[in-house]
C-alpha cells in the first residue's frame, strides 16, 4: 500500500528542486548526454562524474574536456575529489566559473587508487583533512556546497565518529546538503546499504537537507527509502543506469499513480535521442562507441535483454546502432 502523503521536494541552498529524486554521480556514465536524458524524464538535479581537483586546476583545455555543461543541464553540481585544501578551493572556483550551480565534495570514493592517494573515501578515516578541505572550499565560493559521505571507513565502525565530525563541520560551514551512502568505504558496493543509519542521520539533523544513497535499484526503492528513513531526497545510481525512466516512475509512485515500465516505442525514442546527443557531442567516430556503453545498460529494460546486450557489445563490427534499433526496437 503506497502512502499518498505529499512530499515536498528539498532545496539545495537557493535551488528549489522540482522532485525529490536526483541522479547520482556515476563515473563513466553521467556525462552531459546521460544527464540530459535523465532530466528529460524527471531527474530534478544531476552531478558531474567525480573529477580530480588537480585535473581541474591543470589547464582550461583539460577542464573543458572533462566537464561540459550545456545550457539545459541545470541545476548541476560539480563534484571534485582531492585532499589539499588550497587546491580543492581553487578547483571549486574553476567549477563555479564554468557554470556549476553547486559544488559537491567527494569523501566517499572506495576505488583503491583514490584511497592509496588518500583521497575520496580516505577522508572517512582522516576527518581532520576533510574538515580543512570543507573550510577552505566553503570560504572560496559563493555557491551552495554539498558533500558525499559514507557511513564509516571500516565496516565494523559503529560509532561513526569521523562521519559525525565531518557532517557537523559541513553544516557548520554552511553546507546546503549532504548525501549519505549507507555503506562503509571498505564495503565498496558489497552487501546491503544501511538505511537505519540514514534514519539516524535524519534524527540527528532534522532541519538539514539529507539525501540518501544505496540500494535504490527501482523507483519503489526510492519511495520506500524516502518514507522509511525520513531523508529529504533520494539519489538514484545503479538503478538509473539503463533505466532513466526511474525518475518518472518515482514521481508517479509518489503521487499514487502506476509507475509503468517504458514500452518499446518509448525505449526507442530515448535511445534515438541519446544516440543523437552522442553523435553531436563526440562525433561520428567516438559517438557510437559512447552510445554502445549506454546501450549495454539500456538492454536491461528490453524483453530480450541478452540478445540486445550482445548486439551492442558487437556493434562496432556488427550492424551498428541504427541497425540494432531497427532489429530490436521496431515495435
Ligand atoms: C559505476 C559507478 C560509478 C560511480 N561514480 C561515482 C562518482 O563519480 N561520484 C560519487 O559520489 N559516487 C559514485 N558512485 C557511487 C554512487 O553514486 C552511489 O552512491 C552508489 O552506487 C550506491 O547507490 P546504489 O547502491 O543505489 O547504486 C559510483 C557508483 C558506480 C556503480
Image: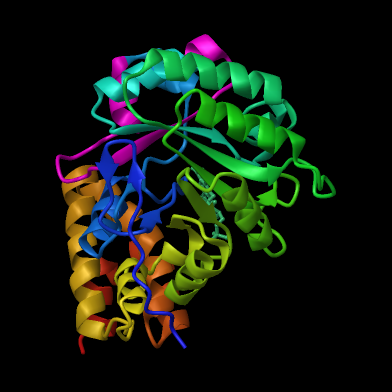
Q: Quadrant of residue 245?
A: bottom left
Task: Tell me, yes or no, whether the highlighted magenta stretch contains residue 75.
Answer: yes
In the shown orientation, is residue 216 left or right of residue 19? right
Image coordinates of residue 50 in percent, x first then y, are 46, 37
The stretch in magenta equals: 60-87
Q: Is residue 104 magenta?
A: no
Q: Position of residue 306 (x, y in %)?
A: 47, 81
> Which residue is painted at 46% across and 18% down in the image?
137
Tell me where residue 252 sits by quadrant: bottom left
In the current view of this chain or complex, which residue is farthest to the top? 86
**Residue at coordinates 64% horizontally, 44% vertically from top-left?**
150
Residue 330 placement, left or right of 149 = left
Relative to 233, residue 111 above or below: above
Q: How is the image coloured?
A: rainbow
Depth check, front residue: 274 or 168? 168
Q: Residue at x 31, y 85 (%)?
A: 260
Amino acid at each position: 500500500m503506497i502512502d499518498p502523503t505529499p512530499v515536498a521536494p528539498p532545496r539545495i541552498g537557493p535551488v528549489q528542486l522540482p522532485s525529490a529524486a536526483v541522479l547520482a554521480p556515476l563515473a563513466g556514465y553521467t556525462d552531459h548526454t546521460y544527464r540530459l536524458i535523465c532530466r528529460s524524464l524527471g531527474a530534478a538535479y544531476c552531478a558531474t562524474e567525480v573529477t580530480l581537483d588537480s585535473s581541474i586546476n591543470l589547464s582550461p583545455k583539460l577542464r573543458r574536456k572533462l566537464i561540459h555543461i550545456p545550457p539545459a543541464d541545470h541545476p548541476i553540481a560539480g563534484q571534485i575529489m582531492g585532499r589539499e585544501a588550497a587546491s580543492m578551493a581553487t578547483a571549486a572556483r574553476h567549477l563555479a566559473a564554468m557554470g556549476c550551480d553547486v559544488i559537491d565534495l567527494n569523501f566517499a570514493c572506495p576505488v583503491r587508487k583514490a584511497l592509496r592517494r588518500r583521497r575520496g573515501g580516505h577522508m572517512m578515516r582522516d576527518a581532520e583533512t576533510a574538515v580543512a578541505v570543507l573550510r577552505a572550499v566553503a570560504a572560496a565560493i559563493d555557491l551552495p556546497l554539498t558533500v558525499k559521505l559514507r557511513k564509516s571507513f571500516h565496516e565494523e565502525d559503529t560509532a561513526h565518529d569521523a562521519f559525525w565530525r565531518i557532517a557537523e563541520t559541513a553544516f557548520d560551514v554552511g553546507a546546503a546538503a549532504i548525501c549519505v551512502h549507507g555503506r562503509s568505504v571498505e564495503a565498496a558496493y558489497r552487501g546491503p546499504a544501511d538505511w537505519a543509519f540514514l534514519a539516524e542521520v535524519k534524527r540527528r539533523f532534522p532541519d538539514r537537507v539529507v539525501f540518501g544513497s544505496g540500494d535504490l535499484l527501482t523507483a519503489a526503492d526510492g519511495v520506500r527509502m524516502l518514507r522509511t528513513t525520513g531523508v529529504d531526497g533520494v539519489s538514484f545510481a545503479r538503478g538509473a543506469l539503463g533505466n532513466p525512466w526511474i525518475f518518472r516512475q518515482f514521481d508517479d509512485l509518489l503521487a499514487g499513480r502506476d509507475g509503468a515500465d517504458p514500452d518499446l516505442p518509448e525505449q526507442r525514442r530515448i535511445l534515438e535521442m541519446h544516440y543523437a546527443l552522442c553523435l553531436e557531442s563526440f562525433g561520428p567516430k567516438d559517438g557510437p562507441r559512447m552510445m554502445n556503453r549506454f546501450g549495454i545498460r539500456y538492454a536491461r529494460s528490453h524483453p530480450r535483454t541478452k540478445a540486445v546486450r550482445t548486439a551492442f557489445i558487437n556493434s562496432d563490427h556488427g550492424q551498428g546502432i541504427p541497425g540494432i534499433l531497427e532489429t530490436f526496437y521496431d515495435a
